[in-house]
Amino acid sequence: MITKLKQIKDERGKLIVFEKDNNLTFDLKRTYFIYYKSSLDRGFHAHYNTNQLLVCLNGTVKIVLDDGYKKTKITLNNSENGIFVPKMIWHYMTDASSDCIMTVMADKLYDKNDYIRDYNKFINEIK
Ligand code: TYD
């Protein structure tokens, strides 16, 4: 689930590369950025069809992944690791720092009908 991101560091700073067939293993259709202003949790959904790569560009955040059988909590606090969240994985973001900035890459366009926002429905769908 953890994807190593290519980092090119020099005296000017750091450059991070997402490249198809390298560390981006899907067809990128959409990128969005999340800027936190408080530690309020986000997410709490699964997607029927969308695969995503989550990266924390600044600050820290914990990602909880739930396949309906097992929950895993992963801390993202650098841009060296991304988390791949496949379709049909319930996920949410918690304990974010107020300076947290995330970017998410997705292989589908935004479609509100692709979301499962009810946990019991998610459990019923996967069983
Ligand atoms: P929301 O799903 O609540 O964010 P999160 O999963 O982080 O809790 O999305 C917030 C709003 O942004 C909601 O009205 C849907 C809209 N949105 C788009 O219009 N396009 C997108 O690509 C995304 C991810 C969200």
Image: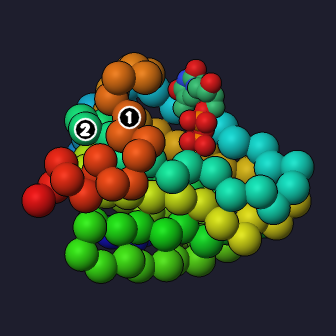
**Secondary structure beneath disc 1?**
strand
Three-letter amino acid code at the position of disc 2: Tyr
Q: Nearer the viewer, residue 61 or 16?
A: 61
Q: Is residue 38 above or below residue 96?
A: above
Total labels: the figure holds: 2
Where residue 84 appears, as percent x and y from the top left, is: 37, 58
Assess mark 1: CB under 8 A from ligand 1? yes
Residue depicted at 29% across the width and 47% down the height: 121
Describe residue 22's horizontal placement relative to residue 62 as left or right. Answer: left
Q: Residue at x 51, y 77 (%)?
A: 74
Residue 115, given in percent of the width and then of the height, sits at 38, 34
Q: Is residue 9 visible?
A: no
**Neighbours of disc 1 within 10 Å: few (<14), some (14-19), many (20+):** some
Q: Position of residue 10 (x, y in %)?
A: 71, 64
Residue at 41% over, 67% down? 65
Element on which disc 2 rests: loop
In which quadrant is the N terminus drawn? Answer: bottom left
Left or right, 64 with reference to 9: left
Report the residue marked by disc 1. 115
Q: Is residue 53 above or below residue 73?
A: above
| Mark 2: few/some/many CA within 10 Å (<14, 14-19, 20+) | some
Badge number at residue 48: 2
What type is the residue that disc 1 sits on?
Tyr
